[in-house]
Image (cartoon, rainbow, N blue to C red):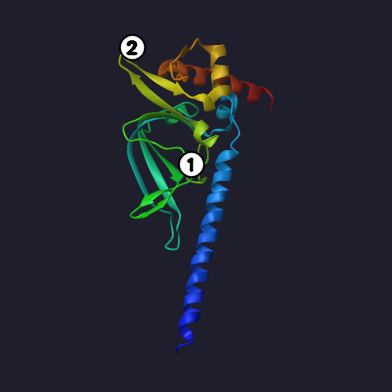
Amino acid sequence: MVNSMPDQSKTLKSSVLLYLLVMFFLCLGQSAYAITVIEKSLTQLLEQSDDVIYGLVTDIHAEYGEGEASQQIYTYIKFSEVQRIKTPEENNQNEFLLRIAGGRVGYRAQVIPGAPTFQRGERYVLFVKGNNKLAFPLVGVNQGVFRVTYDEIKKGYRVIFHKRSKKVLEQFRTYRSMESLDNGASFISLGEFIDVLDSRWQKLSADQRQNR
């Protein structure tokens, strides 16, 4: 009876140490994933996506994956006022549900470095690939997300570009003139953005058909 206490203590310490080591390597692997994302051009975003979707975030909630034994948390982002670029025949579907790995359920949270974040009431353009199949169903992870804001002065929506979108900006400048913001970002009207994406996708599709 006296000798069993040290053994239990050793077992508990070993379990805690093993848990910490597993969490360390999981975090290490996630960080490496975020760092090794390759910068995408506009053409690559279009070619590699299943669809390009514009919409308004109306709901965000997280839950565990399917199956009682699942410990993976997924965040579901619901979009309304949806407009599709690559599958315009589905534009009568007014809602779209995006699933991304990570999130918070109760007191338990899974935070993945580099994962894109969304805000309820905000508008976005998404380059979607592998929704409900991949952990991050966006081409180039963060590169596949563009935030849309409302310009009170010009009374219209604008798509915001950041430094991570350098290749996309370079291509856009060849199609449209762009204005620079003081913070180093650039923007273009939502209408122009959608028009460029649509025309570029039509050309890419035509080129693909010709090369078959």
Query: 64 or 10, which lies in front?
Result: 10
Identify the residue shown where x is 47% and y is 85%: 4
Q: Secondary structure at mark 2?
A: loop
Q: Position of residue 42 (x, y in %)?
A: 56, 24
Circle 2: is it few (<14), some (14-19), or many (20+) Cα within 10 Å? few
Q: Secondary structure at mark 1?
A: loop
Identify the residue shown where x is 45% and y is 63%: 69
Q: Which residue is mark 1?
A: 131
Q: Indicate which disc, 2 or 1, sits on the residue closer to the N terminus.
A: 1
What's the CA distance linking mark 2 and mark 1? 35 Å
Specify whether 81 is left or right of 182. left
Taking the image as drawn, is residue 82 in sight?
Answer: no
Q: Position of residue 173 (x, y in %)?
A: 54, 13
Query: 40 or 7, which lies in front?
Result: 7
Specify whether 177 is left or right of 81. right
Circle 1: is it few (<14), some (14-19), or many (20+) Cα within 10 Å? some
Q: Nearer the viewer, mark 2 or mark 1?
A: 2
Q: Which of the image's four quarters has the C terminus?
A: top right
Query: 180 or 12, which lies in front?
Result: 12
Taking the image as drawn, is residue 115 in sight?
Answer: yes
Q: Which residue is mark 2?
A: 154
Identify the residue shown where x is 43% and y is 16%: 182
- The amino acid type, in three-letter code, at marker 1 is Asn
Look at the picture and state if 33 lies above or below 126: below
Look at the picture and state if 3 lies above or below 177: below
Q: How many marks on residues?
A: 2
Specify whether 11 is left or right of 147. right
Q: Position of residue 201 (x, y in %)?
A: 55, 22
Identify the residue shown where x is 57% and y is 12%: 174
- The amino acid type, in three-letter code, at marker 2 is Lys
Q: Position of residue 38 (x, y in %)?
A: 61, 34
